[in-house]
Image (cartoon, grey):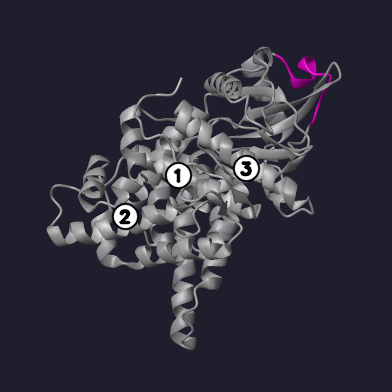
Amino acid sequence: MKEQTKIPKNKVSRAGKLARTGLQVGVNYLKHRAKESLTGDSDKSAFHETTARQTYETFSELKGGPLKLAQMLSLDRNLIPAAYADQFSQAHYSAPPLTYPLVVNTFGKELGKRPNELFDTFSNKAMSGASIGQVHKAELDGKSYAVKVQYPGVADSLKSDLAIVKPIAMRLFQLDSKALDPYIREVQERLLEETNYELELERSQDLADRSAHLAHTRFPAYFPDLSSRRILTMEWVEGEQLDVYAKSAAPQEEKQRIAQAMWDFYHHQIHELRLFHADPHPGNFKVHNGELWVLDFGCTKALDDTFYSDYFSLMNPEVLGDDALFRDALHKIGLLLDTDKPEDKDKLTAVFRESVELLSRPFMSDAFNFGDQSYFDELAAFGERTRLDQELNKLSTSRGNAHALYLNRTYFGLYNLIGSLGSTIKATLPNYAPTRAA
């Protein structure tokens, strides 16, 4: 990976780079329209491929909010064209890292010493880079460590970055402000938490301890004495990133075990702990010696009991099969509004019922085959149909509970990760009782 020797930190320089990207998008579109008028070819694939590459290059240089938004959007291939999803997926752990002198500077500010004064060895080049920080491999007294070093200034220009990125994303993906705002808010809220490595350390240790009993699921040890607000040191884990492992020749029986472990991990955290790992992308998992390792708890989400009960009541077969109960449940989480016209309520109820039936299908049988591509084709067709329904788009903006966005994204990512393993999962319906499990 090509390294960066500097990262733009002041708001003026960052705004300038983002503004130039917006202008380039406009130029690319004019070229596309000119070609269309001359040849009659309305295929936008060349426009999307060029623009996706240029946009990702700028976002990856700036890190922080723009790159985190790219990472989030890449998880939903029903929301953005494939060219952008392919480019933006690099933000998970293949973003261009910063050069070693910038890492040394962060160590000096955070821990008062250079990396080689704290460790016996420390890799000058990053092993991986993502939206918030990059990971180096170090050794001390014969033990190997993964040291996550945060990019300088990623949180300082967060709001101004996202304010400029928003109109670019709206133009690229033909989204209106109301459709994009939840993504912007999520990036802003989660990023502010993710830039606090002391909070991540605390949550990582807590969630690992309370999930330690799960079969075939492992967590690295963490080292507070070698960590700070901008540096996080943990045990180095060998193995393959999950996407690499999914494509490997590993026995399907083993992939089945890994997939079930991942499902059980999320089921335990969402339905029992009500605090869960909310960033299910392949860069956060490794497989080593037939076991699933969870590497990163930077992005977590807590659920209060009332929201949890209201949200998952939609899955209850008694509610889903009763129109009055189902509409009442939709009202509770803000998907139906008192101001909706009767005919609009009918349309929305039908769409939400189809959505819940699709997404809850894995819970409704003793075993569910995520290796069945027809299920994902059905999800994609539903997403495409609703995305292109202009009447529905006018109705569906600015509704729903913000907490639902984190859950929806997590389940979407989870389904895709398990689907990549081609596995059949034993799933159980959640406990609908509103009391928190011990």
Residue beneath disc 2: 352
Residue 251 point in image, percent of width and height = 78, 51
| First along the sequence among labels 1 and 3 | 1
Residue at the spot 30% in from the left edge and 30% down from the top edge: 306
| Sequence-wise first label, 2 or 3 | 3
User: Can I make out residue 423 in this image?
Assistant: yes
Between disc 1 and disc 3, the foreground one is: 3
- Label 3, secondary structure: give it: helix
Of residues 19 and 76, the one nearer the viewer is 76
User: What are the residue bounds of the magenta stretch?
Assistant: 113-123
The first of marks 2 and 1 along the sequence is 1
Q: Amino acid at mark 1?
A: Ala
Asked if marks 2 and 1 touch (Cβ < 8 Å), the reply is: no
Crowding near pointer 1: few (<14 within 10 Å), some, many (20+)? some
* Residue 198, image x, y percentages: 55, 19
User: Of the residues shown, which amino acid type is indicated by label 2?
Assistant: Phe
Badge 3 is on which residue? 260
Q: Which marked residue is nearer to the observer: mark 2 or mark 1?
A: 2
Q: Quadrant of residue 185?
A: top left
Q: Pointer 1: what residue?
A: 15
Q: Nearer the viewer, residue 156 or 409?
A: 409
Left or right, 435 with respect to 2, comes to left
For marks 2 and 3, give the CA distance.
28 Å
